[in-house]
């Protein structure tokens, strides 16, 4: 990122190549829509490029990158909240159409059960408040540390721990029947 800040165009291509997939994956888990996740990821990298000259390496680059992604994802969720009531039936049918690669060692029944459980876990995560969901996604799926999550969410580490505690308690309650 320091090379990009100093005007190295090839460096930006390397950043894009290295982090694009994980940013899209993170945003998909937040917004539950592949096309939107890809659009938001484009906006993330556009902002990285636009603000490259102001980048300061006070934290890891990924912390800064996921902070941008988190803010864009939370904004999209907030803006979509009022629309969600109107087209919830449409979204439920399209959410179920997510492409999954089947494990060839499983029987059809096992695969259907696995998909149902996966869908239920995703719905439980989606049902969390936006900040809790973002914290869980960064902690569990992106394997970010509390300090990195705190910077990405613009809060303290203790607030992150509290968000995660409440989120995991809520998920445990919602998914207790699966244990």
Image (cartoon, grey):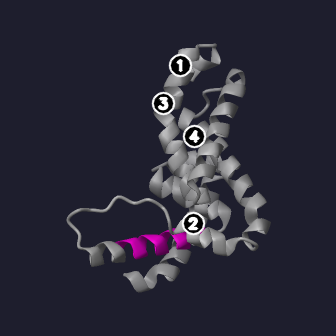
What is the secondary structure assignment of the residue under circle 2?
helix
Q: Which callout, 2 or 4, points at the residue further toward the start of the chain?
A: 4
Q: Residues within 10 Å of mark 1 (few under 14, many from 20)?
A: some
Q: Is the stretch drawn in magenta largely helix, strand or loop?
A: helix
Measure the C-alpha gap from mark 2 to mark 1.
Answer: 37 Å
Q: Please state which of the two labelled residues, at mark 2 or mark 4, is closer to the viewer.
A: 2
Measure the C-alpha gap from mark 2 to mark 3.
Answer: 29 Å
Residue under label 1: 11
- Given residues 108 and 175, the one toward you in this image is 108
Q: Which callout, 1 or 4, points at the residue further toward the start of the chain?
A: 1
Q: Please state which of the two labelled residues, at mark 2 or mark 1, is closer to the viewer.
A: 2
Residue range highlighted in magenta: 114-127
- Given residues 70 and 28, the one toward you in this image is 28
Mark 4 and 3 residues: CB-CB less than 8 Å, in contact? Answer: no
Residue drawn 74% across and 53% down? 75
Residue drawn 59% across and 43% down? 66
Measure the C-alpha gap from mark 4 to mark 3.
Answer: 17 Å
Q: Residues within 10 Å of mark 4 (few under 14, many from 20)?
A: many
Q: Which callout, 2 or 1, points at the residue further toward the start of the chain?
A: 1
Residue under label 3: 17
Residue under label 4: 63
Q: Which callout, 1 or 3, points at the residue further toward the start of the chain?
A: 1
Q: Please state which of the two labelled residues, at mark 4 or mark 3, is closer to the viewer.
A: 3
Question: Is the C terminus in the top left, top right, bottom left or bottom right quadrant?
Answer: bottom left
Residue under label 2: 94
């Amino acid at each position: 990122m320091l090379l990009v800040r100093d005007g190295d165009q090839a460096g930006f291509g390397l950043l894009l190549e290295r982090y694009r997939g994980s940013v899209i994956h993170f945003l998909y888990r937040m917004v539950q829509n592949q096309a939107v996740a890809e659009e938001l990821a484009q906006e993330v990298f556009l902002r990285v490029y636009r603000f490259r000259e102001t980048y300061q390496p006070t934290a890891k680059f990924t912390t800064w990158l996921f902070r941008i992604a988190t803010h864009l994802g939370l904004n999209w969720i907030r803006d979509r909240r009022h629309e969600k009531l109107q087209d919830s039936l449409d979204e439920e049918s399209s959410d179920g159409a997510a492409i999954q690669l089947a494990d060839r060692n499983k029987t059809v029944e096992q695969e259907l059960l696995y998909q149902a459980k996966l869908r239920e876990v995703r719905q439980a995560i989606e049902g969390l408040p936006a900040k809790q969901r973002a914290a869980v996604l960064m902690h569990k799926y992106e394997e970010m540390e509390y300090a990195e999550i705190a910077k990405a969410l613009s809060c303290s580490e203790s607030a992150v721990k509290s968000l995660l505690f409440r989120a995991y308690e809520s998920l445990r309650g919602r998914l207790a029947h699966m244990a």
